[in-house]
Image (cartoon, rainbow, N blue to C red):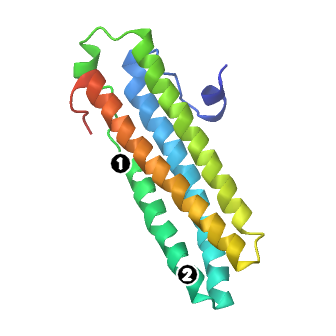
Amino acid sequence: MGFWEKILPGYKGYKEREESRNTDKILREYLTAKLKESRARYEDFKGALTDRGNLDLFKPAEKVTQVMGRVINRLRYANYGFSGRWFGQKIGIDELEKVHEFDKQMATRVQEMQEVVKGLEGLDEDDAITSSLKSLADKLREMDEALNEREQILRTFGGEPEK
């Protein structure tokens, strides 16, 4: 049993083509839930930051909130992909593996972002907080760009993806 099968009930992998739309949806819902957990934790941190009264930190913290919300929504409402048109084509294992690799990279990005959010909680110095906020914003922008890549992968394998 693979990694995803252990943590995602109903995950059947992309090799079972008729189940791939459902698999894609389950995976995106899982990653979205993890991002929402991080957002709740981040909002607690931001509340404590506000209590400190340093308004210089609030602006970059608010930028992170905006980017995080955008990434969560893009992942949550992303095209399912693997449309019926895709199945009409001869799709090889290499193409399926490329989509699977993309998903593993997205999961890794979500984990990295979670670690940065956790690390924020123990910081007291303004410079360290500013640096961590920048790192978090960068990771979120990378995720946003990765979602652009995901859409391109789906277009390549099946025309315009369906919602």
Front: mark 1 or 2: 2
Residue 41 appearing in the image: no
Q: Residue at x 42, y 37 (%)?
A: 25
Examine the rendered structure and indicate whether residue 157 appears above or below residue 142.
above
Report the quarter where the N terminus lies. Answer: top right
**Mark 2 highlights which residue?**
58
**Mark 1 highlights which residue?**
77
The secondary element bearing badge 1 is classed as loop
Mark closest to the chain's N terminus, 1 or 2: 2
| Residue in front for this viewpoint, 1 or 61 | 61
Report the quarter where the C terminus lies. Answer: top left
Q: Residue at x 26, y 30 (%)?
A: 155
Q: Amino acid at mark 1?
A: Tyr
The x, y position of residue 133, in whole percent, is: 60, 67
Could you give the CA–CA distance between mark 1 and mark 2, rounded to whole angstroms? 28 Å
Q: Amino acid at mark 2?
A: Phe
The secondary element bearing badge 2 is classed as helix
